[in-house]
Image: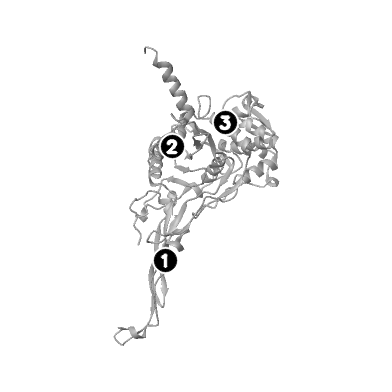
Amino acid sequence: MRVYPNGSLASQVIGFPAAEEEKISGRLVTQIAGRDGVELSLQKQLSGVAGWKVTETDRAQHELVAMRDEDVHPRDGLNVMLTIDSVVQHIVETALADAMKKHTPRSITGIVMRPKTGEILAMVSLPNYDPNLPNTITPETRNRVITDVVEPGSTFKIVVISGALNTGISHLNDPVFCENGHFAFAGRVLHDHESLGNETVKSVITKSSNIGAAKIGIKLGEQNLYDYAWNYGFGQRTGIPLPGEARGFLYPVKDWSKVSIAQIPMGHGVAVTRLQMLYAMAAIANDGWLMRPMIVKQLQERDGSVVQRYAPERVRQVIGEKADLDMIEALKTVPTKGGTAPDAAMKDYVVAGKTGTAQKAENGAYAAGKYVSSFIGFFPADNPELCISIVMDEPKEGYYGGKVCGPVFRDIAERCASYLNIPPDPNLMTNATSLFVENAGRKL
């Protein structure tokens, strides 16, 4: 049997079981079988082995022990220890529940990962379910972090700009003319959310210019853009041991239209999972190294002895150290007064991150007034401990990623930093101390 004492906490990661009947030696035996989450993906390890006896009985069906040929004792299944931290999971679930009430989106997701190891400390998708109550499990309560694909919007700009920096065709201070908000290319007119003129590669990230990203993408070239997107993990599963993970869509260059080279850099014409997008951002937080997402830490026997321990796994280095440091410098400007996510800034830590506001596609066209909003960031920016993704589907009361997702990121990040005892950023502490010393001699 299964009992879930924490109710809906991490329900989509844990999954749920169902009873099914199996015929053994001519008799129907009821067994527990996983239907989702770790219950399904690690069912073999969790299930254990049934015991049996081969024996003879008398006419009254009493066993003749002396005639017993085989006696195999049942063996318990293994215990699975997850990387999920129940406190961090609770922090994220409560913060997302508050955001759900405020913005009433169709769904909202949050992920917390350690970028240096790939360990996932929290994975949340609301609405969720209580595995103790089968009637709460519906298609709407699926784990959208891995099952659903969407156009990422401006968070995808990290791919094209980091690729351009890594190849050396662009540098942070290179000028980029953003055409005052309208750019005609390949028979289409590309737009920015505001009229921007002369910018730099760095401020294209700061202000999230579609036109600036498109021009950098054109300069980078089709094959290079595709290669960097593929190397970041798009168009392929991350390999996380959970069922139902989607690949997303990253079409080969031969299938691109003439305008694809300008649209893909701004996050159009490509579809990703929430986990893939965090996966890519976490690589930038980890010196350009992509780390396999971890959800299972180890397998244990009932007595606590470890049967198998899983180690962090490097996949590949997507960009070099110089390009990575430049990307972080650019991403630091996003949660500032001049950036698109000032509400994501933290009091005692420097944050690096990127906003996304993608118009939803329906029936082959973009739907008016329907957006997927996001903010993905990490902190402390110069020595990242946590990378956090917040995504809302069709939020109300605002829809820009920085406006609706930025405050949720900040709330989760500050509570996690306190719980995990992450040391404050020394640069911010130095500035605060200097201000205190300066004001100490004044009469206030």
Locate residue 112, reporting x and y percent. 46, 42
Residue 329, numbered label: 3
Amino acid type shown at disc 3: Glu
- Figure quadrant of residue 180: top right
Towards the viewer: 206 or 222: 206
Towards the viewer: 48 or 215: 48
> What residue sits 57% from the left and 45% below the top?
290
Q: Secondary structure at mark 2?
A: loop
Q: Earlier in the sequence, mark 2 or mark 3?
A: 3
| Number of residues whose C-alpha sits closer than 10 Å to that of mark 3, classed few (under 14), some (14–19) or many (20 or more) | some
Note whether 179 is above or below 14 in the view shown: above
Note whether 183 is above or below 267 in the view shown: above
Q: Secondary structure at mark 3?
A: helix
Q: Give the residue number, with chain letter if any, for mark 2.
A: 422
Q: Give the residue number, with chain letter if any, for mark 1.
A: 48
| Left or right: residue 94 compared with residue 265 | left
Amino acid type shown at disc 2: Ile
Task: Please name the colour scheme applied to the rendered image.
Answer: one colour
> What residue sits 51% from the left and 27% below the top?
336
| Quadrant assignment for the N terminus | bottom left
Q: CA distance from mark 2 to mark 1?
A: 39 Å
Locate residue 179, reporting x and y percent. 65, 25
